Amino acid sequence: MSTPNSRSRLKTYLVVSALGPDRPGIVERLTRVIDESGCMVRDSRMTNLGQEFAMQLVVEGNWNNIAMLETALPSLEKRQELTLQFKRTELRPPAENLLPYGVEAVSVQQPGIVHHLAEFFSSRGINISELVTNTYSASTTGTPMFTVQLTINVPADIQIAGLREEFMDFCDRLNLDAVLEPVKY
């Protein structure tokens, strides 16, 4: 049985998602509230999407500090005109028997690319752990282009050569220029 004192020493984790108009100082204000609560940012991703700021964080602290942060976030949400969502979580155990692979694909912009890639990997029991997409204009022609970068976790019992061959055939059918290679940390 945990006591309030023992709970305060255990690490507790909170996932925080923030969305709002992009302007200078948002990251500073959000991380100040985290710091003032006695918590720390363990993992984060931030980007600008259109004119919006979007950030996801995993925050670490003891039970009391996470509770203080949960109490402080609604006030920050109002002051900064942000949409904040937060939820307690646990850390993911280290992946066993999974091989991290990177996927990069480039194509003329067309609907459904992300869905088709997700379906290809999902149907083989392969989890996508990271996904980044971007659009741009080709430098010489101005053609709208699309790029996607994935990090996937391939179960060790899947034959990589066979997966790579299936993936390249799949990409040929969709007219994607792609690579599938081990992640080198």
Image (cartoon, grey):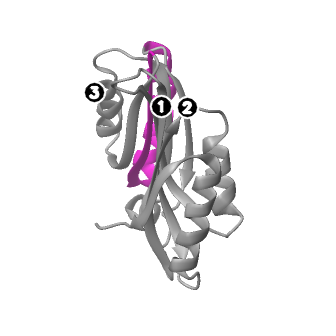
Q: Nearer the viewer, residue 78 or 56?
A: 56
Q: Judging from the image, what secondary structure is the residue with disc 1 in?
A: strand
Residue 39, image x and y in percent? 34, 46
Along the polypeptide, which appears first: circle 1 or circle 3? 3
> Do residues under tags 1 and 2 come within 8 Å of each other at their CB atoms?
yes
Along the polypeptide, which appears first: circle 1 or circle 2? 2
Q: Count neighbours of disc 1 (C-alpha within 10 A) and say few if under 14, some if 14 to 19, many if 20 or more.
A: some
Q: Residue 112 bears which disc, if any?
A: none
Whether residue 32 is in magenta: the answer is no
Query: What range of the chain is rendered magenta?
Result: 51-79
In the drawing, does residue 39 fall left or right of residue 57?
Answer: left
Rendered image quadrant of residue 111: top right
Q: Nearer the viewer, residue 21 or 119?
A: 119
Rendered image quadrant of residue 125: bottom right
- Mark 1 highlights which residue? 145
Question: Label 2 sits on what residue type?
Answer: Gln
User: Which quadrant does the N terminus fall into?
Assistant: bottom right
